[in-house]
Amino acid sequence: MKPIRIDVQYLATIGVFICTLVGFYYTTNFRLDSLEKKIEVLESNNEAVIRLEERLKSVQKKTDEIYQHIMDFISHD
C-alpha cells in the first residue's frame, strides 16, 4: 500500500479558498443585516409620511372650507 502524500501547496490553496468563502459569507450576512435595519427605519418613516399626508389633506380641506366661507361672506356685501 502506498502512503498518501498531500502537497502543502494543495492544502494552502484549499485553505485560501475556504477562507475566501467564509469571509464572503460573513460579509454578505453583515451587509444584509445592515440593510434590514435600514429598511425597518425607512418603513417607519414611510408610515409617518403617510399619516402626515392624511393630516395635511384634512387641514387643506378645512382651510378650503374657511376660504369658501370668507368668499361667500365678501360676495354678499
Image (tube, rainbow, N blue to C red):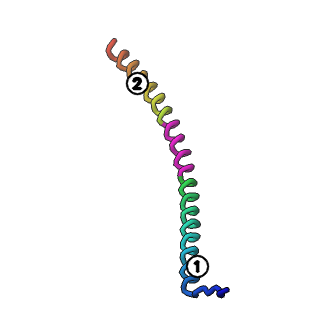
Give the quarter of the image for residue 34.
bottom right
Q: Is residue 54 above or below residue 70?
A: below
Residue 77 appearing in the image: no
Give the quarter of the image for residue 20.
bottom right
Where residue 66 sits in the image (x, y, percent)? 42, 23
Where residue 49 sits in the image (x, y, percent)? 49, 41
Disc 1 secondary structure class:
helix
Q: Which quarter of the rendered picture does the N terminus lie within?
A: bottom right
Mark number displayed over residue 64: 2
Q: Is residue 31 magenta?
A: no
Q: Is residue 39 above or below residue 54?
A: below
Q: Which region of the structure is painted magenta?
A: 39-52
Viewer-nearest residue: 14 or 23: 14
Where residue 58 sits in the image (x, y, percent)? 48, 28
Q: Main secondary structure of the magenta part?
A: helix
> What's the amino acid at mark 2?
Asp
Q: Is residue 7 above or below residue 25?
A: below
Q: Look at discs 2 and 1 and give the one toward the viewer.
A: 1
Viewer-nearest residue: 17 or 29: 17
> 10 Å neighbourhood of mark 1: few (<14), some, or many (≥20)?
few
What residue is drawn where x is 34% and y is 12%? 76
> What's the amino acid at mark 1?
Gly
Disc 2 secondary structure class:
helix
Q: CA distance from mark 2 to mark 1?
A: 72 Å
